[in-house]
Amino acid sequence: MAKFDRKGKKEGQAINTAALPDIVFMLLFFFMVATVLREVEYKIKLKLPEASEIKKLEKKSLVTYIYVGEPKLQYQKLHGTEPKIQLNDAFARVSDIQDYIIGDRQTKNEDEVPFMTTSLKVDMDTKMGIVTQIKQELRKVSALKINYSSRKKVTVK
Amino acid sequence: MARRARPVQEINGGSLADIAFLLLIFFLVTTTMDVDSGLSRKLPPWVPPEEIDETPPIKERNVFIVLVNSNDQLLVENEPMDVRYLKDKAIEFIKNPRNKENLPEKELLSEKIKKAQDKGNMKEVRKLETTQRLLGNIEISKQVISLQNDMSTSYGTYIEVQNELIAAYNEVRDELSMQKFGKKYDDLDPDLDKDKIDAIKEVYPQSISEAEPKNIGGNK
């Protein structure tokens, strides 16, 4: 088999990888732009409900988040399985909401305050009782613009 | 020192790809692609309990009552109903196309303007007149949707119901907008067509009122 005996005479042509970084950079930039870094670590199980009439939240900086749901497994020993409120990175009680909203409001410009929105990220299976309580608290501090966070439902029309 | 001019050494770009890959993988892992979106609503201002007087009388025919109990069942206008039919029922209520006796009353825009003038509410008058200029002297329904849920209604159902009601409003608004401006309501430009948007909102205000929480169907 003389065919295979040509030793080293002609090295296998190396593939030109000069364009590889370009391709990877392109992907990298895509992900950097499309990325929304997670604002907090969820300590609760969160499965958002579905809805079709949703609107995108504009101006992320003016949005305050409130999370509600059943604590994740590793926190259940301490906090039980009843739905809990999470503000920033910690569990909270209903009575903490007012302070939280007011505190958040103070970091913003005064003329931006009317545009502040509270996004309620609530698990599907939560009972309305706790949600109603939260809504009452929000009304008390007149944070009236709210957004029930939900996923886009694919509707067949 | 006459060294022989060495050919310029080429920088090895092979590892560039590795670095970029590393960053790429970092972003891939940390990415959450979800955009924040949801149902936007506005809460009514807080009224201290002692100040709640009798709510202004609204005729029964003008109110569309939706009750949700603790088993996530619906009672719409005193009839059990599946969520699927809620939207159509709500649309019929909002529009009242055949001027039925048991569905909401309507009021001509010109009458509404007159009332506002009598009250001396000039801001309201101006707003209504813009509406009249854009849409003509049309009838405005006095509809109000009342939504009541139980403490143990599940949030998923609540959102489903809210979604259907908002969908009903969006549909009637779309229809009016198509008819008058040849554009869908959502496609109207918030800056350029502000008057048009306001006019449509004037005709079909999203009046979903949520009663103070009650226990319907007992606790579970």
Image (cartoon, rainbow, N blue to C red):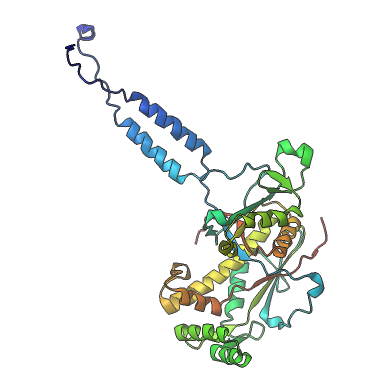
Q: Nearer the viewer, residue B15 or B203?
A: B15
Q: Is residue B196 left or right of residue B72?
A: left
Q: Is residue B153 visible in the rendered structure shown here?
A: no
Q: Position of residue B137 (x, y in %)?
A: 50, 88
> For residue A119, what is the image quadrant?
bottom right
Q: Is residue A60 above or below residue B168?
A: above
Q: Nearer the viewer, residue A134 or B107?
A: A134
Q: Is residue B184 visible in the rendered structure shown here?
A: yes
Q: Which residue is located at x 76 percent, y 51 percent?
A: A93
Q: Which residue is located at x 67 percent, y 60 percent?
A: B158
Q: Nearer the viewer, residue A75 or A37?
A: A37
Q: Which residue is located at x 50 percent, y 79 percent?
A: B199
**Residue found farthest to the front:** B1
> For residue B59, what is the image quadrant?
bottom right
Q: Position of residue A144 (x, y in %)?
A: 65, 65
Q: Which residue is located at x 75 percent, y 55 percent?
A: A130
Q: Is residue A114 above or below residue B20?
A: below
Q: Is residue A21 left or right of residue B96?
A: left
> For residue A150, what is the image quadrant?
bottom right
Q: How many numbered circles are shown?
A: 0
Q: Is residue A108 left or right of residue B102?
A: left
